[in-house]
Amino acid sequence: MRRDALPAALAATLVIAIPGIALADDGTGTTPVPDPAPNTTSPAAPVPDPPPAPTTSTQTTAVPVAPPSRVAAPTRRSVWAGRLLVTSTARAMPGPGGKPIKSVQPIAPLGAGPVWLQVRGVKIVRGVRWVQMLLPVRPNNTRGWMRARDFTFREIHLRIDIDVGARTLTLYRGGTRLKLFKVAVGAPKTPTPTGRFAIAEIIPTGDPKAFLGPIVMPLTAFSNVLNEFAGGNGRVAIHGTSLPDLIGKPVSHGCIRMLNANVRVLSRMASSGATVTIHG
């Protein structure tokens, strides 16, 4: 088993979608561009959505959350995330005539859990509310418009700030710092990408001694220099480590490594859809 792969029990659920976990990190410790600023659309005045059209798509169990009329673009204090309920098409422009970007499934490709996407903008077209979602695809910062009625929503007040130069990960609620952790980041030739991303999934590996540690949190970020790595596509994640002595050093292929105890704490406080800003 590769050191960058999930344990066999979890990897077996991923092999059809993505070989291994497809992360840009192998743990050798060898030394082997910022995204554009978010372009959000201010929400229009609330307009009742029409009832959802009948669908034959497999629907996941909804969670009790706020109605779509409350959903808004990100602010300094919070962001909204939507849990996808049915297979839905992300489009370049809001409205059924927008060019399709990607068909998104309600089951996450790596951990097989629910898909949560971060809301980046809101617009109403002919009485139908559309949400601009941050997609976990290349190129980094790709967004697509999707029907709000295909989601349930929650507001997230926690955010993560990663300073590559200082090699720290800080967890905030609004403007209040809650936790500060030391991390390992990308090596000079395979740097951790900078920009504004989101947590895509939170996956327990089932093996605290695994190279990736007990928790893996794939982001909506991909390496800017590795298009393929160890059978994957250069996906970047926050995860634990079996090499704690390398924490605080620039040694990965782009991933952010944490001590296992710290990544457990982070996974209990953060949630899919939360903002992850990487800079420095």
Image (cartoon, rainbow, N blue to C red):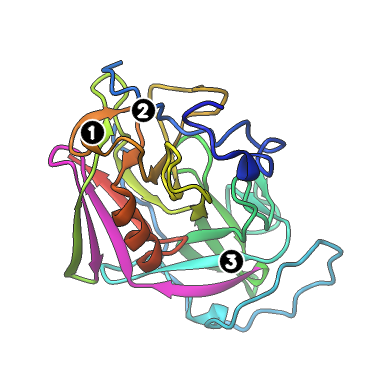
Label 2: which secondary element? loop
Residue at the top extreme, as displayed? 32
Looking at the rendering, which quadrant does residue 73 occupy?
Answer: bottom left
* Mark earlier in primary sequence (2, 1): 2
Residue in view at x 65 percent, y 71 percent: 126
Residue in view at x 59 percent, y 58 percent: 115
Provide the residue span drawn in magenta: 151-173
Q: Which mark is residue 130?
A: none
Q: In this picture, is 63 found above or below 166?
A: below
Q: Which residue is mark 2?
A: 27
Q: Which residue is mark 1?
A: 246
- Would residue 155 be counted in the magenta stretch? yes
Mark 1 residue type: Leu
Residue 223, given in percent of the width and then of the height, sits at: 40, 30
Residue in view at x 50 percent, y 47 percent: 207
Q: Which residue is mark 3?
A: 83
Dominant secondary structure, magenta? strand
Residue at the front extreme, as displayed? 209
Determine crowd level at label 1: few under 14, some 14-19, many 20+ residues with C-alpha closer than 10 A: many
Residue 147, given in percent of the width and then of the height, sits at: 64, 64
Nearest the viewer among 222 and 141 is: 222
Question: In which quadrant of the rendered image does the C terminus lie?
Answer: top left
Mark 2 residue type: Gly
Query: Disc 2 vs disc 1: Cβ atoms closer than 8 Å?
Result: yes
Q: In this picture, is 121 found above or below 66?
A: above
Mark 1 or mark 3: which is in front?
A: 1
